[in-house]
């Protein structure tokens, strides 16, 4: 794991990477905004109503499905045969009003010369809502969402293989790609496929990041600090 503690690096990251791939929730926007926590509590609410459970049992089912399948929805589809569409529609219906236009992030993304994509376990609609609110929707060429992945979520390798295909990555160009994520375990398959990886530090994932540290190439406190460190070393 490489920390950006001093500015002695002289790598031209724009030369190093042609494909810049970003997770969405808690990566593109600040973890501390708690937006994803709101999506998560909408999931609990949906499960409660749908299966007629109390809060505790609904939360237990949600957590078990997440642990077992990496995505609550995936577990509910396999074990409880639920229809994904109404579930996704309901859980992503959250208020994004504190997401402001992010000029600094937009400027940083604008400095990237390669292709930029989003790779998310959420839906295209959710990604679009968030990216539009932040004023950066147009920065991304491809948004690879959970439907593109046939509801198979990161960190399942099959999800990455579908993403790879859609983004035009193959054995000859994958080493020129970099993937940014807050969920440390999602970096392992990416790294094993030959991508470089960057972990967005957060306390929720710190222990896991330690377990998966061999699969993490770069780290920083948030997406903007990582990008500004990477993009300051332009070739003169
Ligand atoms: Mg995330």
Image: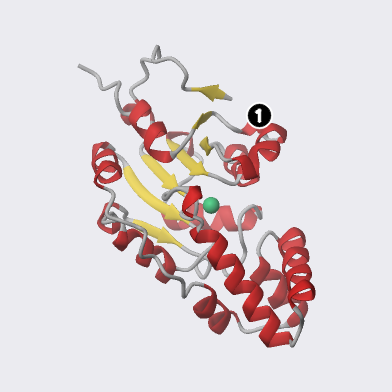
If the image is split into quadrants, where does the N terminus sit? top right
| Image location of residue 204, percent across then percent down | 64, 45
* Farthest-out residue, top: 8
Residue at position x 57%, y 54% in the image: 161
Label 1: how many Cα within 10 Å (few below 14, some 14–19, many 20+): few
Judge whether residue 182 can be spotted in this image. Answer: yes
| Image location of residue 63, percent across then percent down | 74, 64
In this image, 172 relative to 51: left or right?
left
In this view, 138 is above or below 109: below
In this view, 217 is above or below 73: above
| Image location of residue 88, percent across then percent down | 54, 76
If the image is split into quadrants, where does the C terminus sit? top left
Residue at position x 23%, y 41% in the image: 107
Viewer-proximal residue among 165 and 163? 163
Judge whether residue 188 can be spotted in this image. Answer: no
Quarter-of-image position of residue 96: bottom left
In this view, 108 is above or below 137: above
In this view, 6 is above or below 66: above
| Image location of residue 16, percent across then percent down | 38, 28
In this image, 142 relative to 149: left or right?
left
Give the labeled residue for mark 1: 214
């Amino acid at each position: 794991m490489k920390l950006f503690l001093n500015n002695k690096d002289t790598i031209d990251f724009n030369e190093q990477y042609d494909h810049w791939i970003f997770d969405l929730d808690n990566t593109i926007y600040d973890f501390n905004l708690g937006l994803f926590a709101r999506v998560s509590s909408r999931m609990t609410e949906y499960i409660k109503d749908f299966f007629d459970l109390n809060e505790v049992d609904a939360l237990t089912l949600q957590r078990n499905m997440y642990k077992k399948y990496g995505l609550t929805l995936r577990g509910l589809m396999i074990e409880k045969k639920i229809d994904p569409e109404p579930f996704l529609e309901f859980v992503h219906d959250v208020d994004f009003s504190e997401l402001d236009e992010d000029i600094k992030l937009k400027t940083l993304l604008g400095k990237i010369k390669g292709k930029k994509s989003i790779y998310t376990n959420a839906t295209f609609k959710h990604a679009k809502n968030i990216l539009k609110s932040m004023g950066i929707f147009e920065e991304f060429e491809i948004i690879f969402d959970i439907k593109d992945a046939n509801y198979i979520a990161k960190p399942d390798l099959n999800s990455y293989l579908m993403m790879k295909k859609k983004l035009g990555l193959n054995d000859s160009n994958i080493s020129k790609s970099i993937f940014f994520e807050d969920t440390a375990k999602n970096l392992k398959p990416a790294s094993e496929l030959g991508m470089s990886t960057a972990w967005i530090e957060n306390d929720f994932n710190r222990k896991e990041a330690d377990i998966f540290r061999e699969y993490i190439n770069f780290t920083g406190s948030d997406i903007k600090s990582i990008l500004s460190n990477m993009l300051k070393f332009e070739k003169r």
